[in-house]
Amino acid sequence: MGSVMDFFAALGVVSGTSVRQLLVTQASQDGDYIVMKIKMFEAINRTFTLTFKLGEEFDESTIDFRVCKSVLNLEGGKLIHLQKWDGKEATTISEIQDGKLIITFILGDIVSVRTYERI
């Protein structure tokens, strides 16, 4: 299992600063669409909005400036986010366990886990 730093380095994110960010995530639903707003603090003061329908592929411009073909699905209480770009593929699995958000990042043979708490 790799670290979150290994995962972001494999994505090409060179600054470790973005990995240590305080994130505030807000999710809502607008009809058939899910809207996720992610606010990054500290060195990068930026808000990123992701709007999607479960199971439908869409073009995503990521917070680290990649352009991907993405699809999100809900499987067994887990939100599975698959991104494809430049011949690469990454998966992010988000789930709630004991009131905490557990996110597993997968890119090739790199697997890392990060735990977030509600504030």
Image: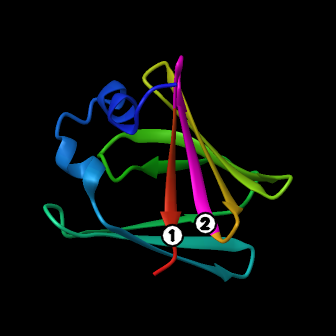
Q: Which residue is mark 1?
A: 117
With 53 as the anchor, is 107 left or right in this view? left
Instruction: Pick out the residue farthest to the left.
Output: 43
Instruction: Pick out the residue farthest to the front.
Output: 98
Residue 54 horizontal/vertical position (percent): 74, 58
Circle 1 sits in a helix, a strand or a loop, which is it?
strand
**Badge 2 vs badge 1, beta-carbon distance below 8 Å:** yes
Q: What's the residue type where badge 1 is placed?
A: Glu
Tell me what residue is drawn at x 51 percent, y 76 percent.
118
* Colour theme: rainbow
Tell me what residue is drawn at x 67 percent, y 80 percent.
29
Q: CA distance from mark 2 to mark 1?
A: 5 Å
Q: Is residue 105 magenta?
A: yes
Vertical order, 26 against 66 (above or below): below
Instruction: Look at the image and tell me in which quarter the C terminus lies.
Output: bottom left
Residue 39 horizontal/vertical position (percent): 34, 72
Earlier sequence position, callout 2 versus callout 1: 2
Q: Is residue 104 magenta?
A: yes
Q: Residues within 10 Å of mark 2 (few under 14, many from 20)?
A: few
* Magenta-highlighted residues: 100-111
Asked whether 95 or 117 is in front, the reply is 117
With 19 as the anchor, is 105 left or right in this view? right
Tell me what residue is drawn at x 73 percent, y 81 percent.
31
Residue 71 horizontal/vertical position (percent): 65, 46
Q: What's the residue type where badge 2 is placed?
A: Lys
Q: Which residue is mark 2?
A: 100
Q: Residues within 10 Å of mark 1 (few under 14, many from 20)?
A: few
Vertical order, 93 against 106 (above or below): below
Residue 96 horizontal/vertical position (percent): 69, 63
With 20 as the anchor, is 95 left or right in this view? right
